[in-house]
Image (cartoon, rainbow, N blue to C red):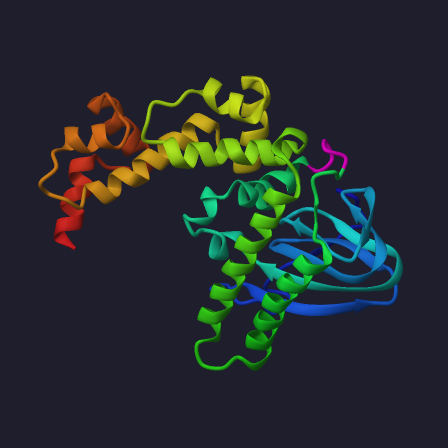
Amino acid sequence: MDMMTTRLFATDIGLEPGFTFRIQKCPLTHEYFVHSHDFSELVVILQGSAVHIIEGREYPVTAGQVFLIHSGVSHGYKNVDGIEYINVMFQPEQLLQLSELRLLPGFQALFYIEPFYRKEMNFKGMLTLNEAQLQEATKLLDLILTEYELQPQGYRLMIRSYFTALVGLLSRYYQIGSGAEDNKALRIGEAVTYIEEHFLQPITLQAMADKAYLSTRQFQRVFTRNYHTTPMDYVIRKRLDYSCTLLRHPNLSISQVALESGFRDQNYYARQFRKVYNCTPSEYREKLQDS
């Protein structure tokens, strides 16, 4: 990272730990210094133009463009010309965990793949909204902005609801905006969605890579960089989490839970379970019953 980059922290700018969120409309009349932060930003360009500097690379931005800046990524603006944008600051682990979102290839691509695959795609995978799409997105952004500024009773609930709707809308626009055949991020997003839909079935690294039109080595590298775990470990964790819901049903034996969670070998299931939860499936079930 550039030594001149300023690091911003959520606590320093008043973002609450339990609800790390801020939205602001930003008319920009001058260059904005290169900086990074320990939270994510969703940026929607409303009008005007500028040059966006991301990790030392320069990219022209105009009205309708949408991009994610995740934690630790340096960025700033120069050559600004009447630009106005809406900036949403948030923590992904607080607002992007709805399981239905993970079933959208456009969500996986826009919010997880493209931001980390940006340089390799030469910025060609970024989302650009047409005029009608920008109007629809702006309606939701204005609703979020009103809730945030007025903070009426239940405003956090409404912000979460509107923001989820916005994320779903942008994910849909991303998916229909370009075909998977010419968008590497979307191809990988479709592979991740394939995992989300089929993790209980026998699934191989080759099958995942084929969905992304990548070699197994390439897919493993890209996936691990973006999701901070290997594809197969991701599948195993999905199965383990699912098994925890099944363990709530006392009529199911441990072997049945293992099998229905995608594990053919009960001993292997027990070993993997202990690695993650530091107890056996039986002990986990006992804790549930005691509570």
Q: Residue at the location (61% across, 53% down)? A: 38
Quadrant containing the C terminus in the rendered view = bottom left
Q: Residue at x 79, y 69 (%)?
A: 27
Q: Is residue 225 visible?
A: no
Farthest residue, direction left: 251
Write down the quadrant of residue 218 in the picture.
Answer: top right
81 relative to 172, above or below: below
Q: Which residues are magenta?
A: 118-122
- Using the image as rendered, state which of residue 263 and residue 49 is in the foreground: 49
Residue 188 x, y percent position in the rendering: 57, 32
Relative to residue 144, is residue 61 depicted above or below?
Answer: above
Image point (74%, 38%), residue name: 124
Tell which of 91 and 123 is nearer to you: 123
Predominant secondary structure, magenta span: loop
**Residue at the extreme front:** 132
Work out whether 237 lies above or below 218: below
In the image: residue 211, left or right of residue 258: right
Location of residue 151 in the rendering, given as x and y in whole percent from the top left corner: 53, 79
Looking at the image, which residue is at 61% across and 44% down? Answer: 176
Q: Is residue 114 left or right of residue 153?
A: right
